[in-house]
Amino acid sequence: MKLKREDIFKALDTISLPGDGKSMIESGAVQNVMTFADEVVVDIKMTTPALHIKKRAEADIIKVIKEKVHPDAKVQVNIKVEKAPQQNPNLIKGQPIPGIKNIVAVASGKGGVGKSTVTSNFAVSLSKMGFKVGVLDADIYGPSVPIMFDVANEKPLSVKVNGKSKMKPIENYGIKILSIGFFTKPDQAVIWRGPMAAKALNQLIFDADWGELDFLLIDLPPGTGDIHLSIMQALPITGAVVVSTPQNVALADARKGVAMFQQENISVPVLGIVENMAYFTPAELPENKYYIFGEKGAQHLAEDLRVPFLGEIPIVQSIREAGDAGRPAALQENTTVAQAFEEFTRNAVEETVRRNTELPATEAIKITTMAGCSAVK
């Protein structure tokens, strides 16, 4: 038996270090391979000294060589631990994604205003208009997009793109979708600090085969925190849509959400505000509108902040039922709900076109320190 180095390299190209999305060859973890008849010595480099990670890497290498090269191969693995270069762990790449024309962040100042519901139906309405659309569920701690698209049990596959291993987004209703929810169990809480969340987002954004998209919608978590800064540093955001309900407590937080994007050193154009749960119309009284949470609060906020008002979405039971069933309400034809989402989407598209015509391309922001509000430079 004579082992060949090229066969060893091919085998190692099919596995990765624990927690790394790239193969051992692609990531540069494999430093050297030597073969002697039926023996092979593999030198690899790691940045973590954790014993269980090193043991797992060693076991993976031995297993793949025996399975793909020769079952009787004698394998020796030498692991060298090198300290990772010092950098701010919250920073992730700041570059555009080839093939994606517009990246729109959908945000809300507070939770419970229906941001993910709006994002899902926004995506479907764009697709119905003929656009190629993707959705990135960036709500690391509470991902709900997989449920809303009826793909909660799906798992992204790995595909080769130009010789590199990439995640293939899950597709349904013509929408490409990626979410941390695909990689966690339904009853598993994601308990991560900022650096871990940033790393996960980095992989979902840049290690994915998004292909050609007219719009990539990013469903942000509520608030104005670490994930938002990481996303805006990672990508040049075309514009942001802020979702609010009409009541004062939601409007106060929506105002902060708009202010975040408009901060001088962030300067992400706000495409507008959309008012969700705007009014209720009972089926037996189709001409009546009941403003349960207040009347036109988000519209007045948009006027006050001098940003576009994109539309109002009524409170309709079918919207909730459609989201729970994994079939967004905008998929329906000629319904009041579908028409409301289509009007909002048309307005958002018009504002995107106006923004691209009148303003220069957005640059990814550079975050240095976290000293109060002077964190962005």
Image (tube, rainbow, N blue to C red):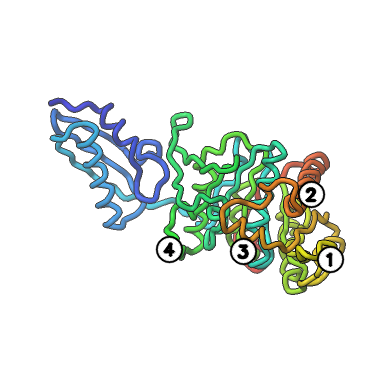
Identify the image quadrant of the N terminus.
Answer: top left
Write down the residue under mark 4.
188
**Label for residue 5?**
none
The quarter of the displayed image where residue 373 is located: bottom right
Mark toward the viewer: 3 or 1: 1
Across and down, in percent, residue 304 comes to 86, 64
Q: Are marks 2 and 4 in contact (CB under 8 Å)?
A: no
**In the displayed structure image, the side of residue 83 where residue 112 appears, left or right:** right
Q: Nearer the viewer, mark 3 or mark 2?
A: 2
Q: Amino acid at mark 1?
A: Asn
Q: Give the residue displayed 77% in from the left and 68% down from the top.
A: 246
As measured in the structure, the alpha-carbon distance from the residue carrying label 3 to the one carrying label 1 is: 39 Å
Q: Is residue 354 left or right of residue 102?
A: right
Q: Percent from the top left, x then y, of residue 5?
A: 25, 28
Count how many numbered circles sit on residues in the image.
4
Task: State the residue position of label 2.
Answer: 343
